[in-house]
Amino acid sequence: MAWQDYVRVTSVEEALQQLDTFDGEGRIIAGGTDLILQLRSGEKKARCLIDISCVESLCHIREKEGRILIGACATHSEISLSPIIAAKAPVLSEACSQVGSPQIRNIGTVGGNIVNAQPAADSVIALMALDAVCQIESSGDDKVRPINQLFLGPGVSDVDSTREILTEIAFDALGPSEGSAFYRLARRKGATLPTLNCAVCLSWNREKRRIERIRIAMGPVGPVPTRLYETEKVLTSDTFSDSLMDEALMTAYREANPRSSLRSGKEYRQEMTKVILRRALLRALRSAGCENGESQEKDH
Ligand SMILES: Cc1cc2nc3c(=O)[nH]c(=O)nc-3n(C[C@H](O)[C@H](O)[C@H](O)COP(=O)(O)OP(=O)(O)OC[C@H]3O[C@@H](n4cnc5c(N)ncnc54)[C@H](O)[C@@H]3O)c2cc1C
């Protein structure tokens, strides 16, 4: 593990200065729930750990002009208990409330969850369905990137935590005709990443009885957190019906490309994509005011 220095900073500027000083050998640490294990195993290296967990400007959760803004150091507990998130992005409350265990939720941060880039990271799957963007700062320049462009492979993100800091995550608050749901399949006693998870955000047109817009994210059904774009197209192509639902579930089954891992086999995961998508979709429809969603859910 062998880092030699540990610096606790109180501002983003100070953190960037420290990253510059260590010139690629310093690394950002927030809750440390992923990083400490990776340093122990030798998967990651650092001469100095730069602790940003006490930077106040990275811990906010607020709404501004219809946008929800979350500091990268907000913990899963803080997000899941936030009244703003419960009212304006319940899909994210649901996701964060199911991460690991109370201890992990109390120190693990949303920023760490994103930068760590696991294909089924719970908050990431919800943020993909919310179409979030991420603000990334470095001493060179600052940039805003859509979250779905940040993932390069399993455990590899396009945020270089030896030189850059993810500072804020932003997305539109959900409106009255919009609904959302998060569904997670996991071992009953496992405090770990899920076997499969799915987040849905949609906009329901009551008069036309159709889904106007939808975003579906699922993990782990590919090397990175995945949007099911083909399935989304099917669901917005016609008025909502049982046959449209069946077509969408089959499309998701084909679109998902899970692999076998310690937590589950490929075939089981592939089959279950239909089950968790159906459940998440019906709950999202119901929360958007579609009565059909409710009756279909009772029927199955
Ligand atoms: C027992 C256990 C159970 C878990 N269960 C789940 C689960 O159910 N679901 C789930 O999704 N995850 C789970 N995790 C994973 C983990 O808790 C999350 O990924 C957590 O959100 C990581 O945040 P952190 O603050 O601890 O990150 P850290 O460990 O501090 O950092 C992780 C990585 O991100 C970088 N980093 C952190 N913050 C920033 C930033 N702001 N800017 C730039 N780089 C940054 C670090 O350098 C490091 O590379 C579990 C972990 C454990 C140990």
Image (tube, rainbow, N blue to C red):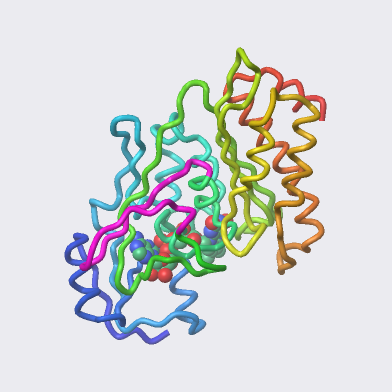
**Count of numbered circles in the view:** 0
Along the viewing direction, whichever of 18 and 174 lies nearer the viewer: 174
What residue sits 43% from the left and 39% below the top?
Answer: 81
Q: Which image quadrant for residue 242?
A: top right
What residue sits 55% from the left and 56% below the top?
Answer: 121
Left or right relative to 27: residue 110 = right
Segment colored magenta? 129-149
Residue at the front extreme of this rendering: 237
- Does residue 116 show up magenta in the picture? no
What residue sits 59% from the left and 38% below the top?
Answer: 200
User: Where, quadrant-wise, is the N terminus in this rendering?
Assistant: bottom left
Residue 32 visible: no
Along the viewing direction, whichever of 216 and 34 lies nearer the viewer: 216
Along the viewing direction, whichever of 110 and 97 lies nearer the viewer: 110
Left or right relative to 76: residue 100 = right
From this view, report whether residue 268 is shown above or below residue 20: above
Tell me residue 183's x, y (percent): 64, 42
What residue sits 38% from the left and 54% below the top?
Answer: 145
From this view, report whether residue 278 is shown above or below residue 226: above
Left or right relative to 215: residue 4 = left
- Does residue 140 show up magenta in the picture? yes
Residue 204 visible: yes
Tell me residue 181's x, y (percent): 59, 36
User: Where, quadrant-wise, is the C terminus in this rendering?
Assistant: top right
Tell me residue 241's x, y (percent): 76, 24
Residue at the top extreme of this rendering: 207
Tell me residue 113's x, y (percent): 46, 59
Along the viewing direction, whichever of 89 and 170 lies nearer the viewer: 170
Q: Which image quadrant for residue 67?
A: top left
Left or right relative to 299: residue 67 = left
